[in-house]
Amino acid sequence: MSRLGSYFIFLGTLFRNREKLSVYLRLILNECTSIGVGSIFIVALVNTFIGAVTCVQTAYNLTNPFVPKNIIALIVRDSSILELAPTLSCIVLAGKVGSNIASELGTMRITEQVDALEVMGINSSSYLVLPKVIASVLMFPLLVIMAGFLAILGGYIAGTLAGVISPEDYVSGLRVDYKPFGVTFALIKTVVFAFLISTISAYRGYNVQGGALEVGAASTAAVTNSCVAIVAADFILTQMLLT
């Protein structure tokens, strides 16, 4: 409880004594490039193969001849949009982006760069952390949209090449009983996950005490705590929005 309270106090410091908007704009654009563009490859690769595996495994389990083949595409579509693309992508991003945020801030803390900002009268938590949070909230949904598309495309390529489903059946299945709210739900989850990953990782890195060993421990703790927060928030949001 003490650590949870400290985390919420840390969130409050992000919005006190902020710098000029022009300063944040430059920092946010730099963070968007680092967080968003730097994560495209890993997110695209993981989700393309996840979609392909989901399609092939679904076809393997649907052996009943009375079940239409287009159900395979429907399952790939719904599982990718509702769960695989947002949740799995954010877990991957927690490992890449979260550990990077924690290690960067931790290194700045132990080398006294954070203290130097405080001496100059700058709110170091707001100056260093807030652009990362905003950039994460902006870029994660874009990455998840790409992830969902590539997961469905990966299922199409794998299914047609493996011969488990025809292109016509796959496209037909994508159109069956489509609910647009699924995309909205995925984006809501992604924004929440982005906020949790960026703030938890920043909290861990910003409060490092010690040396290089503690920076590594903080980076590891940031990833594990972010993953736990993601799965817990995933369950809560699903209960709130889909039931």
Image (cartoon, rainbow, N blue to C red):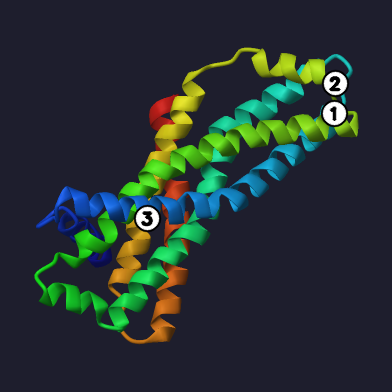
Dividing the picture into quadrants, the one containing residue 66 is: top right
Q: Is the C terminus in the top left, top right, bottom left or bottom right quadrant?
A: top left
Which numbered circle lies on residue 166? 2
Q: CA distance from mark 2 to mark 3?
A: 44 Å
Callouts 2 and 3 close, C-beta under 8 Å: no
Q: Residue at x 18, y 73 (%)?
A: 117
Q: Could you give the CA–CA distance between mark 1 and mark 2, rounded to whole angstroms? A: 6 Å
- Judge whether 62 appears above or below 56 on screen: above
Indicate left or right for 160 with 130 as reference. right
Disc 1 marks a residue whose amino acid type is Thr
- Residue shown at the point (18%, 48%) measured from the top left: 21
Identify the secondary structure beneath mark 3.
Answer: helix
Q: Secondary structure at mark 2?
A: loop
Residue 116, percent from left and from top: 18, 78
| Residue to which mark 3 is pinned | 30
Q: Is residue 106 left or right of residue 115?
A: right
Distance between mark 1 and mark 3 Cα atoms = 40 Å
Q: Residue at x 41, y 46 (%)?
A: 193
- For mark 1, what is the residue? 160
Circle 1/circle 2 CB separation < 8 Å = yes
Residue 157 percent location from the top left of the image = 79, 33
In primary-sequence order, the first of circles 2 and 3 is 3
